[in-house]
């Protein structure tokens, strides 16, 4: 990015935050955002699925652009058997599952994840429409229902399942797209972020900034 375009880039990012981080993101507003595409190399992720994920990936793109995180997603065909055909090396293995289409026995899914682990050393992320227990398995499980409950939106809308190819509600897809792009993917694809937290209360000034406010803290002779 040139020095001339840097201010414009920053202004677009700032203007987009109200839409990106609204309590209930609007699909139309997300799709209408125009942000610079990520500048770094794309990271390949394998997406093993038995229902549609294309809409969610489209809604996630503005968040990925905002975070400067480039992805190269490879999508499997719809496969309830989780055969992992055509597996190729990737930086992340993502399981995108409609749990209602799978065998009810937890051991079956555990066995398929173990088979995937034998093929790949990349992190495994499980996103299922039904609660999944993966104890003892090297896999990260995202709580889709919990995210939607916190946001106050329904996870499922079975009326849309046949037409959209997925039982997820429209509102859930917007919320989950944000979680995927801003939390789950960065946590598994990017290096850990180190930060130093410094408490300046009663050190550089007298008072507690969070309680007294900017007008309530004092700069006394002892703090100069």
Image (cartoon, rainbow, N blue to C red):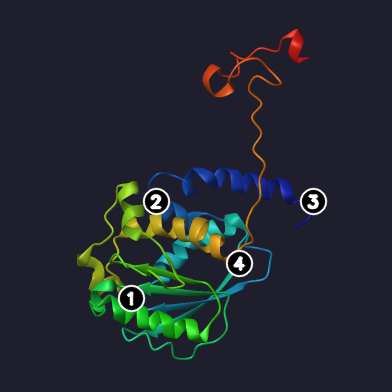
The Cα atoms of the two marked residues, 2 and 3, are separated by: 32 Å
Residue at which label 2 appears: 26
Q: Residue at x 41, y 71 (%)?
A: 136
Residue 22 position by quadrant: top left
Q: Is residue 64 visible?
A: yes
Q: Label 2's element?
A: loop
Residue 79 locus on image (x, y percent): 34, 85
Left or right: 1, with 109 as reference point: right
Residue annotated with mark 1: 51
Residue at left offset 54%, top offset 60%:
187
The Cα–Cα distance between marks 3 and 4, rounded to whole angstroms, is: 22 Å
* Lower sequence index among marks 2 and 3: 3
Where does label 4 land, which residue? 70
Residue 115 screen position, x and y as percent: 43, 86
Query: Is residue 35 something that shows in the picture?
Result: no
3D distance between C-alphas at marks 3 and 1:
44 Å
Mark 3 or 4: the one toward you: 4
Q: Using the numbered discs, state the Cα–Cα distance from disc 4 to disc 1 in whole angstroms.
A: 23 Å
| Quadrant of image for the N terminus | bottom right
Which of the two labelled residues, at mark 4 and mark 2, occupies the earlier sequence position?
2
Q: Which residue reaches farthest left? A: 159
- Answer yes or no: do the residues labelled 1 and 2 have beta carbons within 8 Å? no
Mark 3 or mark 4, earlier in chain: 3
Q: Position of residue 129 (x, y in %)?
A: 30, 66
Q: Residues within 10 Å of mark 3 (few under 14, many from 20)?
A: few
In terms of sequence position, does the residue under pointer 1 or pointer 2 come before the other?
Answer: 2
Mark toward the start of the polypeptide (4 vs 1): 1
| Residue 152 percent location from the top left of the image | 30, 47
Tell me the number on the disc at residue 3. 3
Above/below status of 209 relative to 159: above
Which SS class for mark 3?
loop
Q: Give the mark, 3 or 1, whose residue is nearer the N terminus.
A: 3
């Amino acid at each position: 990015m040139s020095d001339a375009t840097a201010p414009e880039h920053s202004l677009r990012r700032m203007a987009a935050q109200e839409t990106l981080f609204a309590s209930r993101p609007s699909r139309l507003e997300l799709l209408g955002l125009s942000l610079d595409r990520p500048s770094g190399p794309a990271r390949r992720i394998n997406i093993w699925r038995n229902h549609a994920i294309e809409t969610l990936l489209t809604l996630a793109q503005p968040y990925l652009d905002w975070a400067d995180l480039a992805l190269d997603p490879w999508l499997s065909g719809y496969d309830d058997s989780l055969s992992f055909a055509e597996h190729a090396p990737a930086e992340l293995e993502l399981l995108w599952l409609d749990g209602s289409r799978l065998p009810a026995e937890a051991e079956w899914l555990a066995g398929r994840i173990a088979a995937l682990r034998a093929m790949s050393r990349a992190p495994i992320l499980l996103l299922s429409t039904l609660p999944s227990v993966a104890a003892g398995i090297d896999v990260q499980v995202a709580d889709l229902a919990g995210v939607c409950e916190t946001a106050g939106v329904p996870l499922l809308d079975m009326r849309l399942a046949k037409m959209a190819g997925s039982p997820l509600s429209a509102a859930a897809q917007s919320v989950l797209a944000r979680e995927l792009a801003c939390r789950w993917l960065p946590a598994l694809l990017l290096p850990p972020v180190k930060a130093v937290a410094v408490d300046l209360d009663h050190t550089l000034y007298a008072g507690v900034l969070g309680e007294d406010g900017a007008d309530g803290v004092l700069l006394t002779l002892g703090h100069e």
